[in-house]
Image (spheres, grey):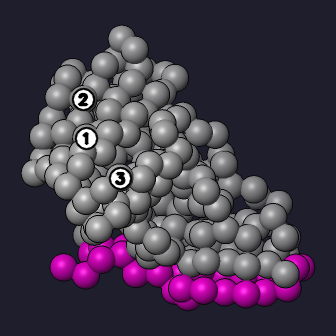
Amino acid sequence: SQQGEEDPQALSIQEGENATMNCSYKTSINNLQWYRQNSGRGLVHLILIRSNEREKHSGRLRVTLDTSKKSSSLLITASRAADTASYFCATDDSGAGSYQLTFGKGTKLSVIP
Amino acid sequence: EAGVVQSPRYKIIEKKQPVAFWCNPISGHNTLYWYRQNLGQGPELLIRYENEEAVDDSQLPKDRFSAERLKGVDSTLKIQPAELGDSAVYLCASRPGDFSYEQYFGPGTRLTVT
């Protein structure tokens, strides 16, 4: 079953613009992770945010977490054509950290050169 | 460092035939996962191994699916017999160990059942 739901399902932007993707989930979590999947390839881990954190940065990525609303957002700044991919949020929904992830359906991002 | 290796990358079989997928995780990674990813969906966990022990196989359809990780290193996932609905990408992932939450994914095996 899918825990997270990403919004929007698809997003198309011009190169240089910012892209924002949202994720909502249903149960309490230990941490939330974002992964990227290029067409026909496996997933690559982007960033992890723990349940006691509210914001985290990594390069051009910014992740926020609101546990009261059970939601997270991923912001990619100054997008590039190479950012074209599907982005998934994944929750580790055990209080103690079960090391098992439940993925959402993903947001398909297209960055137009 | 070599990544997670999976083979084959693509497989086309007729329904009712058996099929097997192989995964070699990153060296030293104790935890191994098998996921199934349907078109337009996120990956769904099938089974998780800690070393050679299957600690969660609740999502594995046991009537036709089986998996093994005999020496706690590489793993095989088998489907017998395959059904049309098994067409999907089968992903393997590994994780180093305790207190490391990030998972490393292989490229996947795309299975088409005709």
Quarter of the image where one finds residue B71: bottom left
Q: Image point 58% across, 69% down: which residue?
A: B90
Task: Look at the numbered disc 3 and give the secondary structure of its residue.
Answer: strand
Amino acid beneath label 3: Ile
For disc 1, the marked residue is A75
Residue A18 in view in this figure? yes
Task: Look at the image and say whether residue B26 sits in the magenta stretch.
Answer: yes
Image coordinates for residue B97, horizontal then vertical, percent = 27, 54
Both on one chain, marks 1 and 3? yes
Q: Residue at 25%, 41% (x, y): give it.
A: A75
Q: Which residue is mark 2?
A: A64
Q: Which mark is residue A13?
A: 3
Q: Give me the C-alpha separation between circle 2 and circle 3.
A: 21 Å
Q: In this image, B49 relative to A67: left or right?
A: right
Write down the chain letter for disc 3: A
**Amino acid type at image mark 2:** Thr
The C terminus of chain A lies in which quarter of the figure? bottom left
Magenta part of the protein: which range? B1-27
* Label 2 to label 1: alpha-carbon separation: 9 Å
| Residue at the extreme right of the image, as rendered | B16
In the image: residue B35, left or right of residue A43: right
Visible residue check, residue B97: no
Whichever of labels 2 and 1 marks the residue nearer the N terminus, that label is 2
- Contact, mark 2 vs mark 1 (Cβ under 8 Å): yes
